Amino acid sequence: MTIPAAARRIAILGVHLESNAFAPVTREADFRSLCYLEGDAIMAEARKPAPALPAEVAAFVGEMDRLGPWTPVPILVTGAEPGGPIDGRFFSSLLADIRARLLAARPLHGVYISNHGGMTSTEGEDPDGVMFEAVRQLVGVRVPIVSTLDLHANISERMADNADVLLAYRTNPHVDQRERGAEAAGVLTELMDGAKSFTAFIRLPLTPASVTLLTAAGPYAELIARGQALKTQEIIAVSVVGGFVFSDTRKNGLAIVVSARDGLASARRVALELARQAWRDRQRYLKRLTPIEDAVRLAVEAGRNGEKPAIIFSDSGDNPGGGGGGNTAELLEALYWAEAKRVLLGVFIDPPLAAQAHKAGAGARFEAVFNRASTDRFARRFKAPAKVLALHDGKCIGRRGLWAGQALDLGPSAALDLGGITVVVGSRRKQAADPIFFEMMGLDIAAARTVVVKSRGHFRAGFDEFFGPEQVYEVDTAGLTSPNLDRVPFKGLPRPVFPLDPDTRWREPVFR
Ligand SMILES: [Zn+2]
């Protein structure tokens, strides 16, 4: 018996966290201060013009609205900036809350889960899987569960087993969050209409650094494109997640999830073909970064010679979007002492420094001490005379790239002129993926000769108006997100694993 569409009760829930095993624990306050919505507040936020919640949730709601009448059952949607494992006690209470809300909301006819998929907890390495299983136990096997995931998800068997269809982003930078949210609405509707889904899952002993997982070109771009090309009538979805190596768990590794309408055989055929391609290409998931000395020389030259193209540096080791503090001064200091000119650098996360600038006032001169209060081994103190160029409360709307149209908040912020280098200082961790963080301070990106962003790759979709791919340099800086994986003290990855263990072998799964 099918339920009339308008009477279909569809639960919406999500817990977004990308966990870096080496970063400080992510606590309840980190979720509450970024996004924590319960019940009807989810719907109200999702339908705002510039919502402050994961874009795929807003898109899911929008597409369900477009498809016809339905009954949303908003449960709980929360997310924190990428950081350390979630505090286990908080996760337990969150899960208990989700369970209670789902129980009270029954009957349910479908469930949409919007998770990142790369979360770990202080008490276990697969809270995403625990959550999926809990939801499945509550709703039973007949109610379809569809989930969207980040391209950096570390998918566990438990997640794959307990969802009907997993839909991962297919772009890096992630500019298809809305498309995947809308696709989830379509897939969930098809399943509620009676379609079946059979899912094949393969994980490879391959943990690439994220700088090799771009989707404009390269092995990963080709793999994702191949996956979509293999989508026949029988295939519902093909997801190829690159994973997030810094989670440092046994469930790490590039993974392929394929769902088919007609049975497991079709899903397995496609998954295996993609897994073979990924493994064949493994040597291509290696990339040479630009040494700091070379970067400094390039910046000095760019400042002196206006004929040369302007350049942009990724401070790749310190990306707040991967759990980095956004507060290492290594590259800033090197550029400062080399007297590089016409440099813009941001966003440097330092709440005491931002507060000091606000207290001093616009136009004031003072001695800026970066990392005055830091105990972080990567975030060393650095002092320089500075002038306050501009002050801002940090609230803005994303202009371009993965956060376009989303409400953002950097907290109290300031632009400081260090003489040749202008630094945007913020108070809340956020990667510099959107040019708005410079523009809201009145800074002219087009006039800069060198721009330095604390972002690993998402800045590409925001700054592409100013810099083509050939003007981008990924600088080999130290920090919690160094793509130079040999430097990272991994403990939990499945070993052997490529590229850490160059001789790693993969044995193909035997499907019976
Ligand atoms: Zn991601």
Image (cartoon, rainbow, N blue to C red):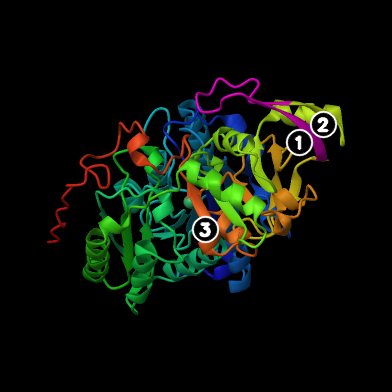
Task: Locate residue 169, reporting x and y percent.
Answer: 47, 60
Kind of residue at badge 1 = Pro
Kind of residue at badge 2 = His
Quadrant containing the N terminus in the rendered view = bottom left
Would you say residue 37 sits in the magenta stretch?
Answer: no
**Circle nearer the N terminus (1, 3):** 3
Quadrant of residue 51 in the image? Answer: bottom right
The reply to whether residue 115 is in sight is no
Left or right: 336 with respect to 246? right
Q: In this figure, which residue is indicated by the disc labeled 3?
A: 173
Q: Identify which residue, 311 or 435, lies in the foreground.
A: 311
Closer to us: mark 1 or mark 2? 2
Query: Tags 1 and 2 in contact by the CB under 8 Å rule?
Result: yes
Point out which mark residue 412 bears: 1
Q: Identify which residue, 47 or 296, lies in the foreground.
A: 296
Point out which mark residue 358 bears: 2
**Residue bounds of the magenta highlight:** 368-390
User: Could you tell me which residue is drawn at 84 percent across and 27 percent down?
Assistant: 359
Element type at mark 1: loop
Count neighbours of disc 2 (C-alpha within 10 A) and say few if under 14, some if 14 to 19, many if 20 or more.
some
